[in-house]
Image (cartoon, rainbow, N blue to C red):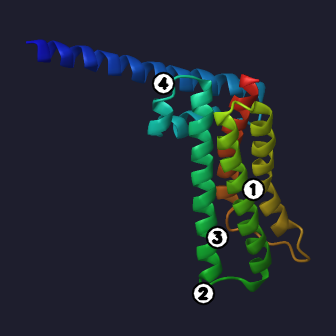
Amino acid sequence: MKFLLYLIVTFFLLLNAFSTAQTLIRDSCKKAAAKNPKFKNDICVKSLETNPQSKAAKDLAGLVVASTKNAASKATSLKGTVNKILKGKKMNKISEMPLRDCLQLYTDAIDSLNQALASMKSRDYNTVVTVLSAAMDAPSTCETGFKERKTPQKSPVTKDNDTLYQMILIPLSFTNMLK
């Protein structure tokens, strides 16, 4: 009987924790969207609600860590996508140089995102904002590399760059709310 009571209490505590995390995510995304017209609330909510670490966050700082890890994962994935394009047989030689530039930009962004995670541990929010801002330049600079060629090219990763931009904007906006 005690065991059954224990299970019931545990179930309700877990249900309450999940509900609290979901409220934290939705409220935080909504506040960030209200402060920045470029911020997409739907992407924020979707990316965080599907992330187990975000669901375990107890406060906004926890969401910054979880969303920064999401952004680093997206940047790493995008770097892999560009590597595959460069190794592919259908690779357009004219696009090779901007794609190689994008690879370096993503590497730098991943480093910045990891530095943001380290700075979150010491609650150095000014550094977190600085390095997240630097990381956020990667997607747009990558796109610019295609547009500013003698013969402008269409980037094969525009949609991914747009998503990466939003994924970095999430922890940047949240960190600004912590300051």
Q: Tell me the distance, in whole angstroms, between the alpha carbons under discs 2 and 4.
A: 45 Å
Q: Is residue 20 visible?
A: yes
Query: Which sits earlier in the primary sequence, circle 1 or circle 3?
Result: 3
Query: Which sits earlier in the primary sequence, circle 1 or circle 4?
Result: 4
Query: Which sits earlier in the primary sequence, circle 2 or circle 3?
Result: 3
Q: Picture coordinates of residue 122 (x, y %)?
A: 68, 33
Q: In the rendered view, does 107 fall on the left or right side of 145?
A: left
Tag 3: amino acid: Val
Residue identifier under label 3: 82
Residue displayed at 68% across by 22% down: 31
Residue identifier under label 2: 89
**10 Å crowding of disc 4: few (<14), some (14-19), many (20+):** some
Tag 4: amino acid: Gln
Q: Which mark is residue 114?
A: none
Total marks in image: 4
Query: Which sits earlier in the primary sequence, circle 1 or circle 2?
Result: 2
SS state under label 3: helix
Q: Picture coordinates of residue 20 (x, y %)?
A: 46, 18
SS state under label 2: loop
